[in-house]
Image (tube, helix red, strand yellow):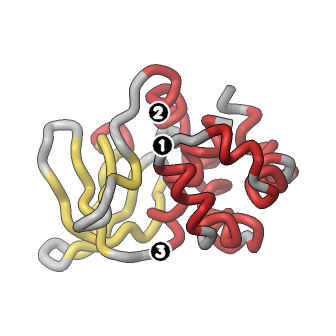
Amino acid sequence: MKVIVFILCLVPALVFADQRVIVLTDGSRIHGEVVGMNGDAWVIRTQSLGEIEVPSSRIRGMETPGSEPVIAPASGSLSAIESTITGDATLMARIMSLRSDPQVQAVLSDPEVMAAVRSLDFDALRKNPKFQALMNDPEMKAITSGLR
């Protein structure tokens, strides 16, 4: 379940091509729009530099200006999941394909589910029918099976 919660935190950064603040491992910040992946690097469109590529290993997190982090620096097992996801271009492509999945869209647009995701309320997520259906989705199972 933690893996799916982490993916749901990641997907909005891929679904909505809004402005992001990309926080690098050295603490510096890049303001731009995440437009995709190229190998193990994130492609980011900035106003001043145009499109740039930033290796996944250099990204600590992503934020939407004025809101909570989309990908927060993680600890323990979530840190390992983050490293696995951002370091695997094939896996990132599979996760990026979720942006057009109606079931994922339904979960992302449900304020109750997203509040539970942000607060890591696993009990509420276990009881939510939309989240349960997403956990049983064959594509989500395929993506998460390699992350455990």
**Residue 109 on image: x %, y %:** 60, 72
Judging depth in this view, the residue of 121 and 138 nearest the camera is 121
The answer to whether 36 appears left or right of 20 in the picture is right
Q: Secondary structure at mark 3?
A: loop
Residue in view at x 14 percent, y 42 percent: 27
Is the Cβ of the residue at disc 1 closer than 8 Å to that at disc 3?
A: no
Mark 1 or 3: in front is 3
Can you tell which quarter of the image residue 42 is in? bottom left
Q: Residue 86 got which mark?
A: 1
Q: Secondary structure at mark 2?
A: helix
Is the Cβ of the residue at disc 2 closer than 8 Å to that at disc 1?
A: yes
Q: Residue 83 got which mark?
A: 2
Cα–Cα gap, marks 3 and 2: 22 Å
Can you tell which quarter of the image residue 62 is in? bottom left
Q: Residue 16 got which mark?
A: 3
Amino acid marked by disc 2: Ser
Outermost residue, top side? 76
**Residue 36 on image: x %, y %:** 46, 65
Position above or below: 90 against 31 = above
- Report crowding for label 2: few under 14, some 14 to 19, many 20 or more residues within 10 A (C-alpha): some
- Report crowding for label 3: few under 14, some 14 to 19, many 20 or more residues within 10 A (C-alpha): few
- Earlier sequence position, callout 3 versus callout 2: 3
Mark 3 or 2: in front is 3
Amino acid marked by disc 1: Thr
Residue in view at x 63 percent, y 55 percent: 95
Amino acid marked by disc 3: Phe
Position above or below: 107 against 124 = below
